[in-house]
Amino acid sequence: MMRLLPADSDSGWTPYAWLIYAVPFALWPAGRSSTLQDWVVNCAGLAVFLGLYFWAHWLKGLRILIPVAGLALLGFAYLPWNPFAIAFYIYAGAFSGYTARTNAVVVSCSLLVGILGLQAWIFKLNPMTLLSGFVFIPLLGFLMLYYARQHVVNLKLRQAQNEVQQMARVAERERIARDLHDLLGHTLSVIVLKSELASRLAVKDPARAAKEIGEVETIARQALSEVRTAVEGYRSTGLRGEFERARALLENAGLRVDANCSFERLPAIEESVLSLALREGVTNILRHSGATACLLQGEMKGHEAEIRIADNGTGYQGKEGAGLRGMRERIGTLGGRLVVRMDAGTELEIRLPLRGDAA
């Protein structure tokens, strides 16, 4: 199925909503005594407009000026006949802003206004129609220029955040590799040496060979226990460990971090939910906030465990994502609550009641 808009468009459904301004042009023949020929000519103009309109959304940079010129020609051809064709000039001015270049917008809007003024003088057009064109052509052109530049900035920011996350993942893998090397490197070397010695002694001194094999078994069991302990530590280091992991991850990403956790050991379910919430909050800071500093705080407030995750970034845009909704649902299942504040940056406050002895 052919797509009308690029799959990676940030505009979502809004380009379809902007077509509302072409509706008066499409319906203009209905308000007068129109012939079939009038309807055919009007529909042909509308079809050309739609083709140029959707084509413009696929272009980047100065190439957008091609459909801009097409829209201007369409407006020039239809305006003397259909007064609502002024919308084509306005669409052309708006699309000129998509170039993200000030010079292109100034030149394009100036030409559009000049052509419109010349046409109005030649064909003696309605002054109110002209007024809307003279106002909205430059207004929308520079408004779209602003949004186009913001899009470029946001794109660069997302790329930088992706690079930071990739660097953090690489650093974590390197840390795990170093830990495993330090843990197993020496042990495996000793096992190899003792196995070779036992092999040589198997005929000459069977008793000593058996002793060496016994020591190999003991060392191997110790190594297996150490590996299990290490893996368990990677899987679940407790809430304190999660705070330290979060601090390291954020600091590796270049943020200033103030982290403080006063929790002792919590029940397994509550600790797991709070650990997941902390991970999600830290992930959101890295992915979306653009922050330079953050606060991670965990403490007891009466019979409740409270975690605060705050940053000085840009805050959430639009609706809550799946991660934040999942966090809210998990916390709510245990009778807790999640409060999101967006005054200066974003602050997540998580309160979870503790049961029985844990409280």
Image: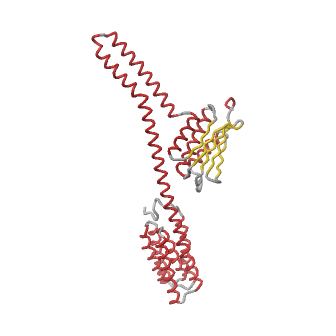
Name the residue rendered at 58%, 81% in the picture.
131
Name the residue rendered at 47%, 74% in the picture.
49
State the scheme by which the image is colored.
secondary structure
Q: Is residue 303 left or right of residue 236?
A: right
> Residue pushed farthest right?
302
Q: Nearer the viewer, residue 266 or 36?
A: 266
Question: Please, is residue 139 above or below residue 127 in the view?
Answer: above
The number of discs equals 0
Task: Name the image quarter holding the N terminus.
Answer: bottom left
- Residue 228: % across, % down: 47, 28
Q: Is residue 329 left or right of residue 252?
A: right
- Residue 284: % across, % down: 55, 48
- Residue 208: % across, % down: 34, 11
- Residue 160: % across, % down: 47, 53
Question: Please, is residue 333 above or below residue 51 in the view?
Answer: above
Question: Please, is residue 266 above or below residue 137 in the view?
Answer: above
Question: Please, is residue 21 above or below residue 208 in the view?
Answer: below
Q: Is residue 121 left or right of residue 217?
A: right
Q: Nearer the viewer, residue 259 or 212?
A: 259
Name the residue rendered at 60%, 35% in the picture.
271
Task: Name the image quarter holding the C terminus.
Answer: top right
Q: Nearer the viewer, residue 253 or 301?
A: 253
